[in-house]
Image: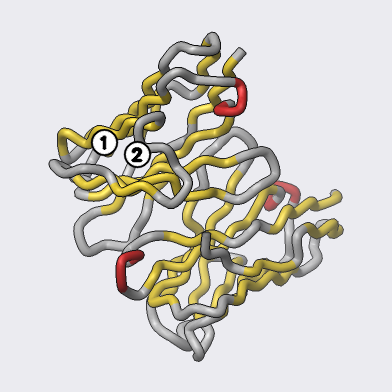
């Protein structure tokens, strides 16, 4: 099925470093969501973006909804060990038979070394 | 607010038996619930969309007779894996959405192991 291209697939960083990951799509989405998933748990919503060009922050996290509505990025500043997990972008389909469904990126596995 | 409870968190069953997984929205009414499947180190793949009071809509390639979905109330959806086989072993996750609100909340997932 439809999928978003999320990169990088994995990151190994030192505590205190900044992190950036992004998602691109060939389709337009009307909402972009960023989730974090820890082992054995469901995804937890970090940031929701509803307008093209929107830049939103949640603590050390910042995400932007691309102007073309086909991309989004997530930045994490000053990483800490508890940032470890898998980060997923998700797009909400704009219309048609897929209206309201989430399409997920492949995920970015983040490892933070103390 | 917006809590989704999923039960059980893990289950082991014998091949050929059926397993039911429950997804409940605890503090809101969920007109739509979604069921996902996730294999290790992979992304979430949507299996089906269930709407309260109507039949579920299954994604291409998902067997509706094998994965039975019931959404009989605004706070409960169930996924029953019928005649389970080892290849059905996976992490199953539900999510719920309020009407007109894209605040999708996910359950904590169910680890199914079929032996």
Q: Quadrant of residue B27?
A: top left
Colour style of the rendered protein structure: secondary structure
Q: Nearer the viewer, residue B84 or A83?
A: B84
Q: Earlier in the sequence, mark 2 or mark 1?
A: 2
Q: Chain of mark 2?
A: B
Instruction: Say which element carries label 1.
Output: loop
| Image location (x, y in percent) of residue B70 | 25, 33
Q: Which residue is mark 1?
A: B26
| Image location (x, y in percent) of residue A49 | 44, 73
Q: Nearer the viewer, residue B102 or B52?
A: B52
Q: Quadrant of residue B100?
A: bottom left
* Residue B1 shows in this picture: no
Query: Relative to B97, is A70 on the left or the right?
Result: right
Give the vertical position of B4 relative to B66 (above or below).
below
Q: Nearer the viewer, residue A108 or A27?
A: A27
Q: Which dot marks residue B15?
A: none
Is the Cβ of the residue at disc 2 closer than 8 Å to that at disc 1? yes
* Residue B9 shows in this picture: yes
Q: Which residue is mark 2?
A: B4
| Image location (x, y in percent) of residue A13 | 84, 59
Query: Relative to A61, is B106 on the left or the right?
Result: left
Report the residue at 65% width, 73% height from top: A22
Give the vertical position of A17 relative to B61 (above or below).
below
Q: Chain of mark 1?
A: B
Report the residue at 17% width, 40% height from top: B74
Query: Relative to A34, is A23 on the left or the right?
Result: right
Give the vertical position of B34 relative to A104 (above or below).
above
Report the residue at 26% width, 62% height from top: B101
Report the residue at 39% width, 32% height from top: B67
Q: CA distance from mark 2 to mark 1?
A: 6 Å
């Amino acid at each position: 099925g439809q999928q978003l291209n999320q990169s990088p697939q994995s990151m190994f960083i030192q505590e205190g470093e900044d992190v950036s990951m992004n998602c691109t799509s060939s389709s337009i989405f009307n909402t972009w969501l960023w989730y974090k998933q820890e082992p054995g748990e469901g995804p937890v919503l970090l940031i929701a973006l509803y307008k093209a060009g929107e830049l939103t922050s949640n603590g050390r996290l910042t995400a932007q909804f691309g102007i073309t509505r086909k991309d989004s990025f997530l930045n994490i500043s000053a990483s800490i060990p508890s940032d470890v997990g898998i980060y997923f972008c998700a797009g909400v389909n704009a219309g048609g038979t897929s209206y309201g469904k989430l399409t997920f990126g492949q995920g970015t596995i983040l490892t933070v070394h103390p | 607010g917006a809590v989704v409870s999923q039960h059980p968190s893990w289950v082991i069953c014998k091949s050929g038996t059926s397993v039911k997984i429950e997804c409940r929205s605890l503090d809101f009414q969920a007109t739509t619930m979604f069921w996902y499947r996730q294999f290790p180190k992979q992304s979430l793949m949507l299996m089906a969309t269930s709407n309260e009071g109507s039949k579920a809509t299954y994604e291409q390639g998902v067997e509706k007779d094998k994965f039975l979905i019931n959404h009989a109330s605004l706070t409960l959806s169930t996924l029953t894996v019928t005649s389970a086989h080892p290849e059905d072993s996976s992490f199953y996750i539900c999510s719920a959405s309020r009407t007109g609100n894209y605040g999708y909340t996910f359950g904590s997932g169910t680890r199914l192991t079929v032996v």
